[in-house]
């Protein structure tokens, strides 16, 4: 009877480390399924580009609601911005673990490198994630296998330690050499694609936390765009270009006031209320803040009020 090929899930961010990890495991003869998680704060577009380059089909899982909960109340603290890296990675590992057990994968792999990120990739954090996820010995880190304890796949002979690597620390030289070996020509910088590490967005989200503790995913998404102003309990967002005008219009929800210039060049403005405010107050605020950035306002100007979308 022919032995079935061992298979693994590889957490795929789209960065070089996860691309390399997937390629290393593929070279070992395993069936490799890249897995990317999508939320209100990051997308799988970089991972899709990466998988296309290395010849693998990406699996996407949306865990936006679960992720939003840990953003609001992280168990293990935050990084330099408002990013709860340990909690976020733990949620990914736990979710991947459920898929692994349900669908019969042999193990999970990640692109983590021991010591590369001081908060989330030190030995204590890696051990913590294994313990709290209930997947001790089932998480393989191909780039750092030789400097970490033996995993269950090694002990079972599914993978061989000698075929993996001993990379540690924050240097990128060895990864770049491996990229050349595997003919990976395009990859993003190691800064990452999580907006929670961005200082400007972190400041905006922190303010939203203070003013609206029970904010929604839509609230978190809409403050990514435009110039942000608060007037008491009104959030005013003024678009900066045509793309942001379209984004604000697309993200509006019932109760919002969205103003668009009709006969002069100017920005779209969205006003959202979080407590009782009259529509006149919302329109007045939107008009006032929008006019600050209008190029030219004719005497007979017209502002078009977009209708609220229908309730879901």
Image (cartoon, rainbow, N blue to C red):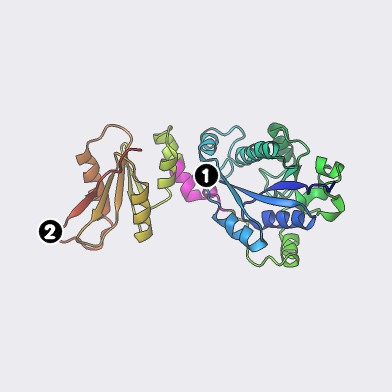
Answer whether residue 201 is magenta in the image. Answer: yes
Residue 311 picture quarter: top left
Residue 224 lies, in percent from the top left, at 43, 49
Left or right placement of residue 142 versus residue 247 in this view? right
Left or right placement of residue 28 versus residue 210 in this view? right
- Res. 189 visible in picture: no
Answer whether residue 103 is magenta in the image. Answer: no
Q: Which portion, as a residue range, is magenta?
A: 193-205
* Farthest front residue in view: 1
Q: Residue at x 52, y 44 (%)?
A: 39
- Between the C-alphas of marks 1 and 2, the distance is 44 Å
Disc on the earlier residue, 1 or 2: 1
Residue density around tag 2, few if under 14, some if 14–19, many if 20 or more, within 10 Å:
few
Q: Which residue is denoted by mark 1 in the rendering?
A: 39
Q: Which residue is denoted by mark 2 in the rendering?
A: 300
Residue 25 lies, in percent from the top left, at 76, 53
Q: Residue at x 57, y 34 (%)?
A: 74
Task: Kindly state the secondary structure of the residue where label 1 is placed.
Answer: loop
């Amino acid at each position: 009877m022919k032995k079935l090929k061992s298979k693994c899930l590889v957490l795929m961010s789209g960065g070089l480390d996860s691309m390399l990890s997937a390629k290393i495991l593929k070279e070992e003869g395993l069936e490799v399924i890249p897995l990317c998680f999508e939320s209100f704060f990051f997308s799988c577009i970089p991972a899709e580009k990466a998988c296309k380059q290395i010849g693998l089909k990406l699996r996407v899982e949306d865990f936006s609601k679960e992720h939003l909960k840990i953003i609001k109340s992280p168990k293990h603290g935050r990084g330099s911005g408002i990013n709860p890296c340990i909690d976020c990675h733990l949620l990914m590992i736990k979710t991947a673990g459920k898929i692994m057990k349900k669908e019969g994968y042999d193990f999970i792999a990640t692109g983590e490198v021991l010591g590369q990120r001081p908060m989330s990739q030190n030995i204590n954090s890696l051990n913590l994630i294994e313990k709290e996820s209930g997947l001790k010995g089932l998480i393989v880190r191909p780039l750092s296998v030789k400097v970490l304890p033996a995993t269950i796949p090694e002990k079972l002979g599914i993978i061989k330690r000698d075929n993996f690597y001993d990379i540690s620390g924050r240097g990128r030289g060895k990864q770049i050499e491996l990229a050349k070996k595997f003919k990976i020509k395009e990859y993003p910088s190691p800064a990452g694609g999580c907006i929670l590490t961005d200082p400007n967005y972190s400041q905006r989200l922190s303010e939203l936390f203070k003013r609206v503790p029970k904010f929604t995913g839509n609230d978190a998404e809409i403050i990514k765009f435009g110039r942000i102003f608060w007037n008491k309990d009104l959030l005013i967002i003024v678009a900066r270009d045509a793309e942001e005008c379209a984004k604000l219009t697309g993200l509006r929800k019932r109760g919002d006031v969205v103003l668009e210039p009709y006969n002069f060049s100017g920005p779209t403005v969205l006003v959202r209320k979080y407590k009782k405010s009259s529509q006149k107050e919302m329109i007045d605020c939107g008009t006032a803040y929008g006019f600050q950035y209008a190029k030219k306002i004719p005497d007979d100007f017209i502002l078009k009020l977009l209708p609220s979308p229908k309730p879901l």
